[in-house]
Amino acid sequence: MASISDPPLLSDFTQLLRSCPTVSSSSSPIQNAAVATPRECELPVIDLSGLSSEREAERRSCAAAICRASSEWGFFQVVNHGISSELLGEMRKEQVKLFETPFETKARSALLNNSYRWGNPTATSPAQFSWSEAFHVPLTKISDPSCYGQFISLRGVMMEFAAAMSRLARTLAGVLVENLRHRGRSTAFDETCHESTCFLRLNRYPVCPLSPEMFGLVPHTDSDFLTILYQDQVGGLQLLKDSRWVAVKPNRDALIVNIGDLLQAWSNDVYRSVEHKVITNNKVERYSVAYFLCPSYDSLIGSCREPSVYRKFTFGEYRKQVREDVKRTGHKVGLPRFRLQIST
Ligand SMILES: C=C1C[C@]23C[C@@]1(O)CC[C@H]2[C@@]12CC[C@H](O)[C@@](C)(C(=O)O1)[C@H]2[C@@H]3C(=O)O
Ligand SMILES: O=C(O)CCC(=O)C(=O)O
Ligand SMILES: [Fe+2]
């Protein structure tokens, strides 16, 4: 049963169904959703304590595992990542409190820099609807006390969590960049990442009576360098592996890392930004927090090796194109827009 803290997802979705002439009443509300339960898989697990080992062979082998998983899967899990379970627990507790607030407050009280979103306002068909709500907070706003209203205890936790995720994301990106650097041109990677464009996204996936035919989050790739995800034990995240959807088995000790579009472009398709989605649950709600590592808008993304598969573009240009495509068609096109034509 929906509560006063839930956004009006069902009525919005029903309206979308009615306004969409292509969906017949006899067919499933979502034509493309993964109704058949896909295979559950354990993502590669990488023990990050290897990176700080005294033994060079161990450091190398850990870095190699990160790079291998980034090109074979585009996704992996990290354990011994250095973020304490106490901090993760605090973050989850505060996140739950925040989402338990009445919907009207979340939507109207300028909480977290007015960053509250739900459903999908740009959906043009039921298949583009996401059964979820989120706060999408730029890192530059996280320390601002005016963002928090009655949730002032969230501030310290968010600050500590963002700082820890930032460190981890930069370490992982550093390993991935270093691996390809000696083979091609180098870029001052660390300086291109910027607080003004990095963000934390707090996700909640309410119980969905229409599940499992609904997306909690529609299939997409992330428009960043890389993403680190802290999810609960409910499950629902699925990714494309060898053209098939596989369900990620939650691991209590691990954070999930995935490569974003910008690292795929920079690596000239060595690392892969893989499509993923979230499937809803009809019994329990689900929570996750994602950290997105992004460059400043004026950063030029060029390939680390030639011949480049993509034309050079700035992150600002990329974001604008994604936004325009989503607004016009309801879905993201992403990297294929920036692929160079191969002349034969
Ligand atoms: C409608 C969309 C916006 C989004 C791309 C998408 O097609 C589906 C997921 C959205 C999402 C969620 C996570 C990130 O916040 C985001 C930046 C991303 O990479 O995928 C957004 C996209 C967006 O707003 O550009
Ligand atoms: O909640 C999840 O498991 C995935 C979230 C996600 O893909 C995103 O926020 O981009
Ligand atoms: Fe994502």
Image (tube, grey):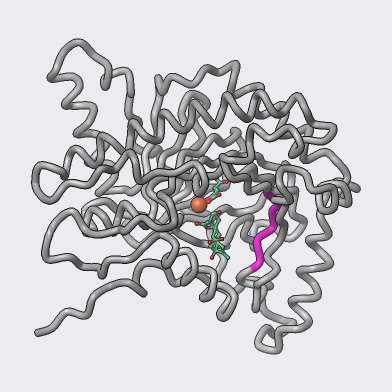
Position of 275 relative to 168 (above/below): below
Q: Name the residue at 67% across, 73% down.
A: 126
Q: Residue furthest front?
A: 298
Location of residue 300 by image quarter: bottom left
> In the image, is residue 9 part of the stretch drawn in magenta?
no
Q: Is residue 114 visible?
A: yes
Q: Main secondary structure of the magenta part?
A: loop
Q: Position of residue 150 (x, y in %)?
A: 85, 32
Residue 249 drawn above or below residue 301: above
Decide if residue 246 is on the left or right side of residue 263: right
**Quarter-of-image position of residue 244:** bottom left
Residue 280, image x, y percentages: 65, 52
Residue 20 percent across, percent down from the top left: 71, 84
- Direction from residue 163 to residue 21 in the image, left or right: right
Q: Where are the magenta residues, as a range?
A: 129-134
Residue drawn at point x = 74 percent, y = 82 percent = 25
* Depth check, front residue: 125 or 34: 125
Q: Quadrant of residue 268?
A: bottom left
Point out the residue furthest to the top here.
54
Whole-percent x, y for residue 58 in the image: 18, 19
Tell how many labels.
Answer: 0
Image point (26%, 55%), residue name: 266
| Figure check: 126 above or below 226 | below
Q: Closest to the observer: 47 or 330?
A: 330
* Nearer to the camera, 59 or 23: 59
Q: Residue visible at 58% across and 40% down? A: 140
Q: Is residue 34 visible?
A: no
